[in-house]
Image (tube, helix red, strand yellow):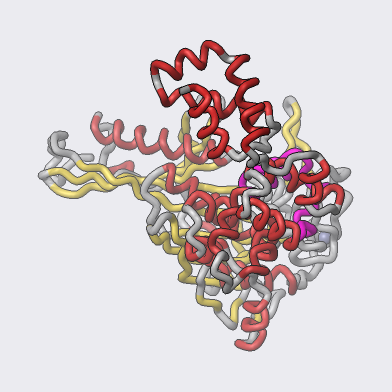
Amino acid sequence: MLLLNGEVPPKNNMKTTPIIGLEVHVELKTKSKMFCSCDANHFHVEPNTHTCPVCLGLPGALPVPNKKACEWCIKLGLALDCTINEETFFERKNYFYPDLAKSYQITQLQKPFAINGKLNIDGHEIRINRAHMEEDTGKSIHIDASTLLDFNRSGVPLVEIVSEPDIQSAQEAKKYLNKIQQVIRYIGISDADIEKGSMRCEPTINIKVEDETGVYYTPLAEIKNVASLTGVENAIDYEIKRQIDQYQSDKITKNSTNKTTRGWDADKNQTFLQREKEGSADYRYFPEPDIPPVIFSKDQIEEIKKTLPELPDAKIAKYKSYDLSDYDANLLAEDLSFSNAFDAIVQALIGKPEFNEFAKFTANLFSGAIRQKLNETQESFDISKLSGEYFSNLFKAVKNSEISSSVAKQVIVESYETAKDPVEIAKEKGLIQVSDTASLEQFAKEVIEANSKAVEDYRKNPLAIGFLVGQLMKVSKGSANPQLAKEILEKLLK
Ligand code: ZN
Ligand code: MN
């Protein structure tokens, strides 16, 4: 950047701070479209079959707002700690594009449903400017030299969430998107799938440069066509470097401080200039004359608020109050059904002295065996059917040293599959923890015999006992009491 007198500022002692904002578009999974009764599902559907005069933009067709979509937009606003405008209205954003049949998009500019929210990312508050309601466009499909148009997506309800430029790194942007996605999935208004296109994001970036001559801002760039979370991270990282490089190589002149729109090329892993950005004046926004103002009363908004589930931040705080680690707390809160299943199970011992211990025990099974089973089986594993009683029986058995924790992992999933008490399963399989000295000595002798190399290691380094204990656990199919096993091995090796 040039100074006012045309001089180039020195490049030493330069401090750079990325200023990043995110615009996120989310397609709502309502049954019907935003302003007509067409089926809103457009994935894997014969092109142009979910259309009508309204969403094809035919003259004289009148839009009627989808009440559910408006309620969901308010619900999202509430989940993002926004203030809800009781009276709002729609506006026309005018521009020509082949996939926009009306030549305008119905959206909200002056009075969005939700304003002034926030989202907490690792203790850093990202302010949210707005969440407003609008409609999706159709899709252009380019085949060789031709372009085909599919209007199934035209008019699908879309919520746009705009953050303030409070995000400071690509990593933080990714965390913000993950969290937006998590909240949206918690409240069940969209599957928010970036790869599928039901969630789309456009980062806006520039750099604050400070050196001994003053403070400068690089020109703002908005990045389009980023189709994955990793893409967002890479695009932001690329753009941060590019803008700093450009600043340093003095290619920025006073005339190029306009906003620009840049595309993201995922193959080349770089952004490229698309066009100088339009200001909102270029869209000739004006109130939509065919739709009267939309009014939600305080009571109606209160009713919507009641439908909010416990949200991720509250879940995480709750789990930390159970003395669970950050890792466990985050993992349990990852998705709502997982978290709710955990809550239902630990419920039984709330207020009991051993509660925290039980919560830790259950969290371990959830993050290990249960999560694994869930990943393997996807939908067919109904986690809400896990029995709290079975977990508490198993917990007592482990606490009384009847069952080892490794056996607990083995039997808990089986108890779900067979609807049988896991302690019973362990008994039937002979996996009750062996604490009697005679049997353990028998196992220990077997292990010592079979592992002469490890025994030698142990004579040189007592820490090598761990391997032998591990072998003994294996031989006993996980049923040996590990502490006793260790003591007996040490005794025999003396
Ligand atoms: Zn329609
Ligand atoms: Mn938009």
What segment carries the magenta color?
A: 365-387
Q: Looking at the picture, does residue 278 appear above or below residue 300?
A: above
Q: Looking at the picture, does residue 155 appear above or below residue 86?
A: above
Residue 476 is left or right of residue 51, and the answer is left
* Residue 290 position in % (x across, y down): 71, 74
* Along the line of sight, the residue nearer the viewer: 158 or 408: 408
**Is residue 373 in the magenta section?**
yes
Please identify the quadrant where the N terminus is shown. Answer: top left
Q: Residue at x 24, y 32 (%)?
A: 248
**Is residue 301 in the magenta section?**
no
Question: Magenta span: helix, strand or loop, mainly?
Answer: helix
Q: Which quarter of the picture shows residue 359?
A: bottom right
* Along the line of sight, the residue nearer the viewer: 104 or 261: 261
Q: Is residue 189 among what the camera can see?
A: no
Q: Residue at x 39, y 16 (%)?
A: 460
* Residue 440 position in % (x across, y down): 63, 33
Q: Looking at the picture, does residue 78 appear above or below residue 414?
A: below
Q: Which quarter of the picture shows residue 391?
A: bottom right
Q: Residue at x 58, y 28 (%)?
A: 470
